[in-house]
């Protein structure tokens, strides 16, 4: 079967033939890949910035944003059947017996750092025709999401982040019960890529008055998608952060989705009273930047601010993402579908994986 693989030693990325996998355990499920989304992580691995093949292999099959169809199940599989659509999770537990997060099924909080990640770290990914995985790491999605189900995985980033935000903000005794806020609460999303726009949808759906700040012009498809879901779009090409804050007033939440360290730390002094700042992006190694450290620290103390980072997602976040994506598709069908800019056969992977990003989300498809 075909697979897109990175060879770090040879510094090459190519389409290869690999053996088709078979069920090995009673809880295994065989999947036929339908679509795999391409993201910045894939491009960075393909440019040899990081990524690690499985032990004993000289290559790593790319891909961690998936939509697949069940084609075969092991004898002990109960929740899935042939023909079901599923999305596969990414991070898997370490083997450490004392790593409580991994033993509890939460490798996103792994203590040892010895976790593996499909398509990223020491386990092959999903940019291939067939995959076998354990039932516990698969999340069923309804047939109604066939056209956009590949967006579930990037949406899980926002789902996990917001889950932690609710826990943090519950420390405030006047916060409303549940996961819904008044529109007087303001959120700023940094970045209008897929993670940013899906995060904006989640914030709007939860009741935040949401602003998206990104470098794309006001006439871009990214800006149109943000406005279509009820967020205000502010372009960095025409507005400074200072002018953004004049539009927003007190900022209760900043959801960073760019991986741009300078923009993020320039934004931190503008976080409001009792505000929360969430980092989701991973910056590349670049030149040092100047940071207003004294002001940031002063604000965090005097304004009761919280700063945290979030990585990957747990199976619960995948279930919430599936439910919310269903809601988004009913509420904003055109905007949700517009996030997928192109679909290309896997043979044309180079245009999506090796070239600079174009559009919002590019997806690779596989033969039926």
Image (cartoon, rainbow, N blue to C red):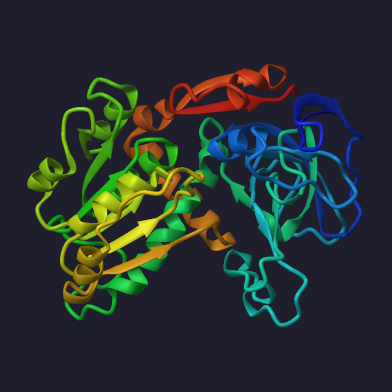
Q: Nearer the viewer, residue 220 or 71?
A: 220
- Residue 128's spot in the image, x, y percent? 76, 33
* Res 259 quadrant in image: top left
- Residue 191 lies, with reference to residue 309, above or below; the image says above
- Residue 221 lies, with reference to residue 10, above or below; the image says above
Q: Residue at x 31, y 52 (%)?
A: 290
- Residue 347 lies, with reference to residue 16, above or below; the image says above
Q: Residue at x 13, y 45 (%)?
A: 242
- Specify whether residue 345 is in view: no
The answer to whether 233 appears left or right of 1 in the picture is: left
- Residue 297's spot in the image, x, y percent? 25, 69
Q: Residue at x 9, y 44 (%)?
A: 247
- Specify whether residue 342 is in view: yes
Q: Nearer the viewer, residue 288 or 261?
A: 288
Figure quadrant of the N terminus = top right
- Residue 367's spot in the image, x, y percent? 74, 22
The answer to whether 115 appears left or right of 342 in the picture is: right
- Residue 17's spot in the image, x, y percent? 87, 27
Q: Nearer the viewer, residue 159 or 188?
A: 188
Figure quadrant of the C terminus = top right
- Residue 235 lies, with reference to residue 120, above or below; the image says above
């Amino acid at each position: 079967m075909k697979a897109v693989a990175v060879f770090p030693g040879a510094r090459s990325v190519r389409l290869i033939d690999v053996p088709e996998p078979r069920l090995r355990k009673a809880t295994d499920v065989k999947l036929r890949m339908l679509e795999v989304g391409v993201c910045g992580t894939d491009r960075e691995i393909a440019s040899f910035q990081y990524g690690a093949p499985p032990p004993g292999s000289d290559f790593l099959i790319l891909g961690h944003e998936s939509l697949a169809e069940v084609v075969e199940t092991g004898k002990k599989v109960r929740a899935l059947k042939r023909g079901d659509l599923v999305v596969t999770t990414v991070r898997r537990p370490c083997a450490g017996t004392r790593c409580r997060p991994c033993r509890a099924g939460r490798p996103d909080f792994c203590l040892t750092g010895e976790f593996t990640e499909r398509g990223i770290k020491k386990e092959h990914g999903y940019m291939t025709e067939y995959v076998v995985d354990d039932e516990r790491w698969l999340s069923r999605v309804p047939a109604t999401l066939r056209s956009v189900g590949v967006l579930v995985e990037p949406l899980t980033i926002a789902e996990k982040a917001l889950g932690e935000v609710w826990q943090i903000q519950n420390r405030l005794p006047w916060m409303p019960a549940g996961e819904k806020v008044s529109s007087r609460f303001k959120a700023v999303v940094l970045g209008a890529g897929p993670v940013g726009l899906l995060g904006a949808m989640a914030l709007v759906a939860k009741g935040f008055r949401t602003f998206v700040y990104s470098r794309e012009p006001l006439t871009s498809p990214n800006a149109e998608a943000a406005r279509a879901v009820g967020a205000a779009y502010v372009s960095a090409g025409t507005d400074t952060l200072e002018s953004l804050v004049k539009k927003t007033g007190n900022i209760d939440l900043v959801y960073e989705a760019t991986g741009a360290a300078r923009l993020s730390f320039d934004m931190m002094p503008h976080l409001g009273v009792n505000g929360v700042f969430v980092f989701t992006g991973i910056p590349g190694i670049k030149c040092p930047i100047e940071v207003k450290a004294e002001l940031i620290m002063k604000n965090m103390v005097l304004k009761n601010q919280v700063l945290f980072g979030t990585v990957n997602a747990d199976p619960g976040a995948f279930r919430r993402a599936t439910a919310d994506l269903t809601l988004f598709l009913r509420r904003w069908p055109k905007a949700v579908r517009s996030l997928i800019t192109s679909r290309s056969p896997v043979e044309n992977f180079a245009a999506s994986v090796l070239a600079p990003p174009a559009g919002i989300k590019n997806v690779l498809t596989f033969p039926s």
